């Protein structure tokens, strides 16, 4: 029996490569004659770089870049292995992430995405011809201007001086100069992994929906929303205006908009981008069974989470799919109606949160072993 093991991470506990390894250990204990393909996955958010690097036999590059509030941070980008054009993967969260800023220091108007642009520039300097940019987890609401500045774009005020701040300063921009854009962008495809549909501005926009968690009070939200609208107008006047109402333009504090308007890139569902990068469909073509999972499965998983994306591709091939989770929330049974063969919690009874987290690998291994033993027995029973 050949099993494809394609999980997402168990957040705050195990990365997707660690989850995949634990599942493989358990499966081979329960069904020793099996073969396994490990395909650690992500949906474009945290963990995407490491998942794709491991799945493709690539490598990590480390750079010291500017953090969201200007302090230096050490951040990783991934260079993927395999055929085709050199592909790099960058996570916004690595250089411009909310987790990099202590809760009492979060400042949506001051934070910038400059460090993410530095990582993209590093990828271009390495010769990347395709960049996958994960948009999850940002601390910023600067419309991607910091990212663009790191790539050579200049934003100028009425006196011809550079505007170099965050979202609070966007209202000073009157002109944009793209003559100094990094020359590598001319030959590079930029694909942003985006799983939200927020426009740039308005009640569903970047500032209104995500600003409060980044430290913005109601007055700041209103100011940032107006400044993002101003930025969109300036870019439109320069012939660079992407449609600010495009679903996903408001992702990562407006970085989605900058990808469209200034990097001439595209927004794609995160899971689809990752699945294509690791060649998931080709691996599924050889599978008898698929194991997937993530930390929590519930009704919201149907909105495009990794296990459901795996399930849909596998079921299109008639392959059964078993999903394992650290916890099952309300509506988890709806995944069965959607086509999942089985949905199981790996936690053996009532335990506290800390114990569940610390024993996640052991619990995954034990559950996979049990599932494998049952599956193998069912396949070998007498006719």
Image (cartoon, rainbow, N blue to C red):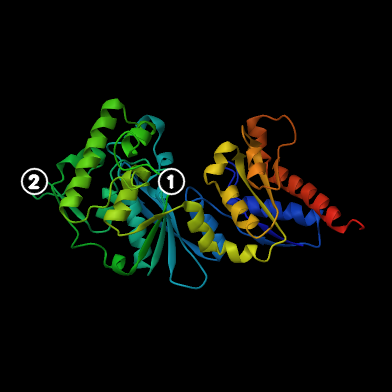
Q: Residue furthest left?
A: 159
330 vs 228, left or right, is right
Nearest the eye: 314 or 295: 314
- Residue occupying the point 47% across, 48% down: 45
Residue lying farthest to the bottom in this orientation: 83
| Residue tagged 1 | 136
Residue 379 x, y percent position in the rendering: 83, 57
- Near mark 1 (Cα within 10 A), the count class, few <14, some 14-19 or many ≥20, is many
Q: Quadrant of the N terminus?
A: bottom right
Q: Is residue 132 visible?
A: yes
Residue under label 2, please give it: 158
Q: Is residue 72 left or right of residue 276?
A: left
Looking at the rendered image, the quarter that the C terminus falls into is: bottom right
Name which quarter of the figure residue 28 lies in. Answer: bottom right
Provide residue 95's location: percent of width, then percent of height: 38, 49
Decide if residue 167 is on the left or right side of residue 134: left
Residue pictured at 69% horizontal, 57% vertical? 319
């Amino acid at each position: 029996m050949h099993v494809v093991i394609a999980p997402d991470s168990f957040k705050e506990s195990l990365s997707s490569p660690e989850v995949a390894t634990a599942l493989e250990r358990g499966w081979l204990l329960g069904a020793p004659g099996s073969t396994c393909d490990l395909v650690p996955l992500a949906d474009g958010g945290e963990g995407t770089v490491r998942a794709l690097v491991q799945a493709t036999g690539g490598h990590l590059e480390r750079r010291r870049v500017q953090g969201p509030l200007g302090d230096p941070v050490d951040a990783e980008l991934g260079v993927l292995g395999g055929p085709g054009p050199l592909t790099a993967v960058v996570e916004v969260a690595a250089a411009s992430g909310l987790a990099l800023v202590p809760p009492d220091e979060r400042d949506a108007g001051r934070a910038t995405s400059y460090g993410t642009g530095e990582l993209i520039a590093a990828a271009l300097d390495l010769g990347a011809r395709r960049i996958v940019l994960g948009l999850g987890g940002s601390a910023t609401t600067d419309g991607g201007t910091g990212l663009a500045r790191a790539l050579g774009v200049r934003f100028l005020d009425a006196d011809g001086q550079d505007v170099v701040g965050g979202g609070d300063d966007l209202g000073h921009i009157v002109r944009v100069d793209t003559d100094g854009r990094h020359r590598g962008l001319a030959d590079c495809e930029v694909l942003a992994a985006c799983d939200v549909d927020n426009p740039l501005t308005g009640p569903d926009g970047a500032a209104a929906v995500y600003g409060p968690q980044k430290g913005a009070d109601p007055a700041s939200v209103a100011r940032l929303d107006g400044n993002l609208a101003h930025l969109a107008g300036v870019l439109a006047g320069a012939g660079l205006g992407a449609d600010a109402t495009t679903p996903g333009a408001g992702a990562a504090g407006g970085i989605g908009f900058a990808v469209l308007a200034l990097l001439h890139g595209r927004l794609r569902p995160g899971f689809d981008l990752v699945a294509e990068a690791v060649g998931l469909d080709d691996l599924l073509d050889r599978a008898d069974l698929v194991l997937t999972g993530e930390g929590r499965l519930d009704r919201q998983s149907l909105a495009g989470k990794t296990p459901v994306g795996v399930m849909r591709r596998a079921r299109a091939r008639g392959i059964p799919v078993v999903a394992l989770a650290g916890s099952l929330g309300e509506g988890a049974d709806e995944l069965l109606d959607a086509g999942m063969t089985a949905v199981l919690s790996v936690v053996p009874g009532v335990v506290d949160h800390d114990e569940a987290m610390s024993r996640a690998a052991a619990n995954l291994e034990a559950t996979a072993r049990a599932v494998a033993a049952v599956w193998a027995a069912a396949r070998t029973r007498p006719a």
